[in-house]
Image: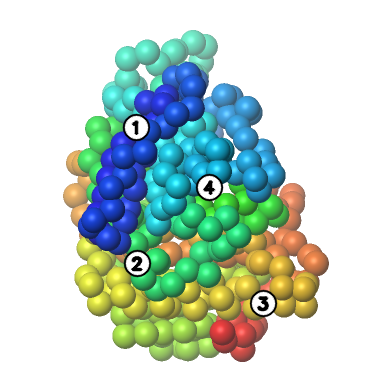
Amino acid sequence: MKKTSTRLADGRELIYYDSRDDLVRDDPDRRPLEATSTASEIRYDPLLDEWVAIASHRQGRIYHPPADECPLCPSRDGRLSEIPAADYEVVVFENRFPSLTSAVTGAATGSVTDQDAAPGEQRSGPLPQLARPGVGRCEVVCFTSDHDASFADLTPAQVALVLEAWTDRTAELSALPGVEQVFCFENRGKEIGVTLGHPHGQIYAYPFVTPRTERMLAATAAHRRRTGRNLFDDLLAAERADGRRVVSAGEHWTAFVPYAARWPYEVHLYPNRRVGDLLALNEAERAEFCTLYLDLLQRFDRLFDAEGGARTPYIAGWHQAPGRSGAPGTGGELALHMELFTIRRTVGKLKHLAGSESGMDVFINDVSPEQAARRLREVSP
C-alpha cells in the first residue's frame, strides 16, 4: 500500500491510499476555498453521565446533490470536487463539516467530577454546567471513485485496501493528544439519513469513551468478577456452540445474529481470536475478513429483492477498545468486532425508533433473531 498525504485549499488533510507504489498524487486543489470555521463543543449531561456534541455549523452541509455535482467524485471534466485527482482507489480526508474539531488539546472522561474539571468549564447554580471544546477529528472515507457502486460491489482486493486505510487511521488518530476512542463506520441509504449517495464511510476520533463502549466495558468487568473469564470469549463460544443464529463462519471469523438483537436484521462479525483493535489483526484474519464481509453485505442486499433490486439501507461500524490511558486492562477485555444492521424489517416497511426506543432505550424487535439468521443463510449470494 502507498499512502500519500496532501492538503486541500482550505488546509484540511487529504490522504490517498493506493495499491500501486508507482502512482504519483500531486494534483493541487484549485478551488477558491476559505478556511473552515467550526463551533463544536461537548456538553455534559449529569442525568445520564454522558457527553453530547453540539455542532450547529453542520446545518449548512451539502444535502443530496445531483450525481453530476457529487463532492466525493474525482475532479474531472472541468468540475472540481473534494478529491483533486482525476481518479482514485481509496481516499480519506478531514470532513468539511465536522462534528468534532481538529484542534485536539485535552480529553473528557466518561464520568465527570470536580477533580476532572478542565479550565474553561462553567459552574453556576446547584449543578455545574460543564462544556468543553469539541476536540477530536472527523474524517470521510471514500471506498471507490465509482459513484454508482456500493461497498458490496468491491473486490476482495479493494476491501483489503479499505481495511488498510481503516487500520492506518485508527493508529494515527489514536495517537492524537486527547483522543480516547476511534470509530470507523458506514451509513448507507437515504432511509438511514445519508445525504451523499457516493459510497463512503466516516471515522470519528472522540475526546471521550462513548456511552455504548462504557456499558460494554462495565458488563465485561462484571462478568470477569463473576466468572474469571472474558465476556466476549464466552459470548462467541456460546453462539458457535448453539449455531442457530450463526449466519456464516470461517477459520478466522464468525458472523452471527445476537441472541437479543435490537434490529430486524442485525449481524455481529467477530474474529475467532480476541483482539482489541484493527491493528492487532494478522494477515490471515485480514484476508478472510474481506471475503466474509462482502458475503454478508451481498446477503443483506438479497433480503428484499422483491423491491426491485433496491439496496438495503444499513449501518456498519467497528467496535474497538478505547485508547484511554490510566485504565489498565480495559483494552485487553473489549474485543474488536463489526456490527451491521438494517432498519428495514420487511419489504416496504422500516423499523422506526418510536416511543419505547427513543424515549426509554428499550428496543422492541419485530423479527426473532433465529428467524433473521435463517433468512440470511437462505439468501446466499
Contact between marks 2 and 1 (CB within 8 A): the answer is no
In primary-sequence order, the first of circles 3 and 1 is 1
Give the residue drawn at x 77%, y 73%: 308
| Left or right: 140, with 102 as reference point | right
Q: Nearer the viewer, mark 4 or mark 3?
A: 4
Q: Name the kind of residue labelled 4 in the image.
A: Cys
Depth-wise, is mark 2 or mark 4 nearer the camera? Answer: 4
Q: Badge 2 is on which residue? A: 160
**Residue farthest along the right direction in this orientation:** 348
Is 342 displayed left or right of 319 in the figure? Answer: right
SS for callout 3: loop
Instruction: Classify 10 Å Cα crowding around label 4: few (below 14), some (14-19), many (20 and above).
Output: many
* Dot 1 alpha-carbon crowd within 10 angstroms: few under 14, some 14 to 19, many 20 or more: some
Q: Mark 3: few, some, or many residues within 10 Å (few <14, many ≥20)?
A: many
Q: Could you tell me how far apart the alpha carbons at marks 2 and 1 are, in whole angstroms?
A: 25 Å
Task: Specify the quadrant that holds the N terminus.
Answer: bottom left
The residue that disc 3 covers is 303
Q: In the rendering, at what x and y percent does residue 341 appear?
A: 57, 65
The numbered mark at residue 348 is: none
Mark toward the start of the polypeptide (2 vs 3): 2
Q: Which residue is mark 4?
A: 73
